[in-house]
């Protein structure tokens, strides 16, 4: 990705959510408060202006997104399902005893900000590349800091997660933790993904889990985005955030085992693809 500029894909996910807020039926899928908080964050951070938000909210924008279904079937609505999946994992994990939440590659995600006030005895951490994290921090400042929300600006491609967290006095090594990697691992190199899972294992305690989304590998060995894979891969590359990592669902169990984790389809929910991605949960 472009190191000096805030993530375009994170911005697109956030705008997509705003538009989903205008699509009938989506309010029963999107976690409550997501759309409103995302709008606030986008404006408060300076990532966008009120005019763009109004446009993103329009019925016309819903139609435009829907008209791209030929290229990526189900992808528009998939962002709502992904948010619901991740938030469900966090709530479930807290219910099962987690006291720490870590959102990796958080972008403009508002889960930490929204849930920190609801679960005041749980610590929320977010990490993102500095260019995006600093803009977001500006927005969170304006929206109202949470004492139990820690925003970390770090390039996970350069700095080890283990070192970043160990040097943070608020991080509790060995705590039951829910980690979220939503729309992240496809942007990292295969070595970086393997290393990230190993490090997540190292920094968390018994009972922890990691919830993530991933793109499956196609028969040609490339990330499989459906019939228009070639075009999608090219668009991602041109946008400066190419996809590097994918995996065949049947190979996920072994991959996770090699990094210390156990695949936990029983925690993941109904199997199947959501747009271009699959969801997965690994537990310790
Ligand atoms: C597609 S966005 C997803 C944002 C958020 N997880 C969501 O779904 O709303 C990918 C995010 O990963 C972050 N990211 C990519 N490479 C990273 C790296 N090397 N270190 C830290 N963050 C990274 C980007 O800055 C961006 O915010």
Image (cartoon, rainbow, N blue to C red):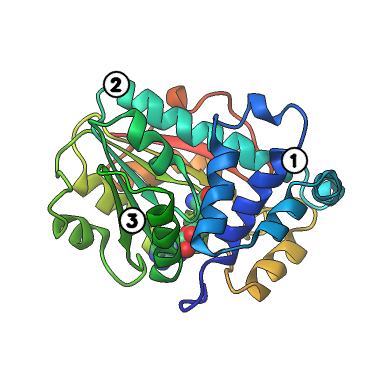
Q: Which residue is mark 1?
A: 74
Q: Say what secondary structure mark 3 lies in.
A: helix
213 or 42: which is nearer to us? 42
Instruction: Answer few, some or many: residues within 10 Å of disc 3's Cα (few below 14, many 20 plus, some between 14 and 19).
Output: many
Q: Is residue 219 left or right of residue 192?
A: right
> Disc 2 and disc 3: Cα gap in Å?
24 Å
Q: Is residue 192 above or below residue 169?
A: below
Instruction: Answer few, some or many: residues within 10 Å of disc 1's Cα (few below 14, many 20 plus, some between 14 and 19).
Output: some
Of the two numbered discs 3 and 1 in the rendering, the one whose residue sits closer to the viewer: 1
* Residue 31 x/y as whole percent: 55, 30
Residue, x 33% and y 66% (percent of image)? 154
Residue, x 43% and y 49% (percent of image)? 143
Which quadrant would residue 271 be assigned to in this image?
top right
* Residue 59 x/y as whole percent: 84, 43
Is there CB contact under 8 Å for labels 3 and 1?
Answer: no
Query: Nearer the N terminus, badge 3 or badge 1?
Result: 1
Q: Which residue is mark 3?
A: 196
Which quadrant would residue 275 be assigned to in this image?
top right
Of the two numbered discs 2 and 3 in the rendering, the one whose residue sits closer to the viewer: 2
| The label number, if any, that marks residue 96 in the structure image | 2
């Amino acid at each position: 990705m472009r190191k000096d500029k805030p993530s375009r894909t994170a911005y697109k996910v956030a705008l997509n959510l705003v538009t989903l807020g205008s699509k009938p039926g989506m309010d029963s899928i999107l976690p409550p408060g997501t759309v409103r908080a995302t709008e606030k964050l986008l404006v408060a951070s300076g990532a966008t202006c009120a005019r763009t938000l109004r446009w993103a909210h329009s019925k016309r924008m819903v139609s435009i997104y829907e008209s791209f279904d030929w290229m990526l079937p189900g992808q528009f609505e998939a962002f709502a399902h992904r948010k619901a999946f991740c938030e469900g994992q966090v709530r479930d994990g807290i219910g099962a005893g987690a006291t720490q939440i870590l959102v990796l590659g958080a972008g403009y995600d508002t889960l930490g900000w929204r849930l920190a006030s609801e679960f005041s005895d749980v610590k929320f951490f977010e990490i993102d590349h500095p260019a995006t994290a600093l803009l977001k921090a500006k927005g969170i400042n304006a929206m109202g800091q949470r004492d139990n929300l820690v925003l970390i600006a770090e390039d996970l491609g350069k700095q080890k997660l283990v070192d970043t967290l160990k040097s943070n006095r608020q991080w509790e090594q060995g705590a039951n933790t829910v980690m979220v990697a939503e729309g992240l691992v496809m942007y990292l190199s295969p070595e970086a993904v393997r290393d990230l899972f190993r490090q997540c294992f190292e920094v968390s305690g018994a009972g922890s889990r990691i919830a993530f989304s991933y793109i499956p590998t196609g028969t040609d060995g490339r990330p499989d985005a459906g019939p228009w894979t070639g075009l999608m891969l090219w668009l991602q590359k041109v946008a400066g955030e190419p996809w590097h990592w994918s995996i065949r669902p049947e190979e996920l169990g072994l991959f996770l085992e090699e990094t210390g984790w156990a695949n936990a389809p029983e925690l993941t929910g109904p199997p199947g693809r959501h747009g271009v991605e699959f969801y997965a949960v690994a537990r310790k």
